[in-house]
Amino acid sequence: MMMRQEEGSMILPWLLLFLLFSSFSDGLGLLTSHPMLDRLSGSSSSGNYLTQKEFWFNQTLDHFSPFDHRQFQQRYYEFLDHFRLPDGPIFLKICGESSCNGITNDYISVLAKKFGAAVVSLEHRYYGKSSPFNSLKTENLRYLSSKQALFDLAVFRQYYQESLNSKSNRENVENPWFVFGVSYPGALSAWFRLKFPHLTCGSLASSAVVLAVYNYTEFDKQIGESAGAECKAALQETNELVEQRLATDAKAVKTLFGAAELEIDGDFFYFLADAAAIAFQYGNPDKLCSPLVEAKKAGDDLVDAYAKYVKEYYLGSFGVNVQTYNQKHLKNTAVSEDSADRLWWFQVCTEVAYFQVAPLNDSVRSTKVDTRYHLDLCKNVFGEGIYPDVAATNIYYGGTKIAGSKIVFTNGSQDPWRHASKQTSSTDMPSYTISCHNCGHGTDLRGCPQAPLNIEGNAEKCSSPDAVNKVRQQIVEHIDLWLSQCQDAARSAI
Ligand SMILES: *[C@@H]1O[C@H](CO)[C@@H](O)[C@H](O)[C@H]1NC(C)=O
Ligand SMILES: *[C@@H]1O[C@H](CO)[C@@H](O)[C@H](O)[C@H]1NC(C)=O
Ligand SMILES: *[C@@H]1O[C@H](CO)[C@@H](O)[C@H](O)[C@H]1NC(C)=O
Ligand SMILES: CC(=O)N[C@H]1CO[C@H](CO)[C@@H](O)[C@@H]1O
């Protein structure tokens, strides 16, 4: 039975979704409050995608219930230009906490060419056009979890393998599969290999946030480190000034930042903190630090300088919408292109937390962004009793002690998310940090800066392209080795 809840009323406002697409919002990933950004790949100009042709298949709504057999339609993409038919590898690129509008043309296309691989990509349940429900009220979000999403990937993987076999008139043949993901999808990529080792030869877990963290103070600390002493001091001074002005004329200072709609002060401070974080997370540190440090030296108004950066860069070219931070917006249960904000907060408020609270000492962000702020948000947006059980998540997956194998972990040196990633390297789970001035989130697949998109993940604009290329070489060697081990195993099984 196919249905979207509420007596099968399953029509989604597709047209509306299309109209709401902002030109900057295509691509992998999410918001900074989220591990990632939605606005990574620039406009939907065709070169940015390997394909945007949609396919659909019927997915089980609840993989863990023996009674509930409802299904929903899940969107996916396939790119076969480089595929060495019929036995080539299949790269499953995992989509995450945003609308998945196609397969972006990042470094994976270079890898696909090199290995003669097909690339397929499945939209994450609930996001984009893969919403099982036409209302996102809290009750309906009960099937939104990483565990269900992993099961989706497994079922999709089987479905796709079988349909490929039937197209090629063969049975029980297994192509070698490899999974890829950046950020939350990076964690899913590692967890997929952990939970379904028989379904993939290996995994690339780029900037993978595999450790659920309750008070994620390391995030802010990394911002301070990535900024360097001068810029960090300027950011801290700016924050103090904003706090002072907020006490006397809140309306004026919020308006100065184009954020008058943020009535809750915590929302406003969270927005200001994210605006700074984004510069380091996505490889554009100088866009933020140069004007601030200059303003400081010239004795100019730091708040004005920061407001200019926020409006021109964060809201302007980067394309963030202020309402993303507005709890009133987060409470909106309508399915739209902007639902990702509410959906990701639900995952944050139930599974992974990553509460980006200010550290007790020396914080860059306002101390008003504390644990209480996050818990209040969860309660206000989703209702009583919604808070993250981080311990349960880490028991389930193992956190940084993940007992997987054949997973490559990569981190960017400037990325505030790297402290939620795998800390140590082993033969079976090698890990690499790419170090350079603008190496942030997902540098291995995206190059520099990490937003907007660099076609084929071009790394020329990284302050050290060499650092990126060395890690890419390692990635290629691991993929090569693990794919061949998979093929050997397949041959000996025959
Ligand atoms: C999905 O389910 C619907 C309704 O049961 C059915 O009509 C459709 O053929 C199915 N699609 C696929 C690809 O199996
Ligand atoms: C998180 O921080 C809050 C406030 O400092 C503290 O009360 C709480 O115990 C911390 N929780 C964890 C799990 O560290
Ligand atoms: C607080 O941070 C400052 C600046 O980084 C440092 O010098 C000081 O030792 C820290 N104090 C504590 C108690 O950690
Ligand atoms: C894979 C890897 O090298 N991870 C690094 C991620 O960030 C942590 C915290 O800085 C490092 O300790 C890890 O080495």
Image (cartoon, rainbow, N blue to C red):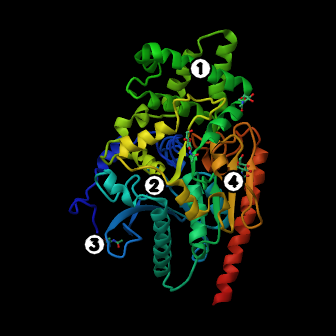
Marker disc for residue 1:
3
Q: Nearer the viewer, mark 2 or mark 1?
A: 1
- Contact check, label 3 and label 2, Cβ < 8 Å: no
Name the residue type under label 1.
Thr
Marker disc for residue 410:
4
Number of callouts: 4
In depth, the one of 341 and 65 nearer the eye is: 65
Q: Which residue is mark 2?
A: 52
Q: For the residue with label 3, is its CB less than 8 Å from the closest atom of ligand 1?
A: yes
- Report how far apart the C-alphas of labels 3 and 1 lie in the structure: 56 Å
Q: Which residue is mark 1?
A: 238
Q: For the residue with label 4, is its CB less than 8 Å from the closest atom of ligand 4?
A: yes
Name the residue type under label 3.
Met
In depth, the one of 406 and 77 nearer the eye is: 406
Residue 143 vertical placement versus 249 (above, below): below
- SS category of the residue bearing label 4: strand
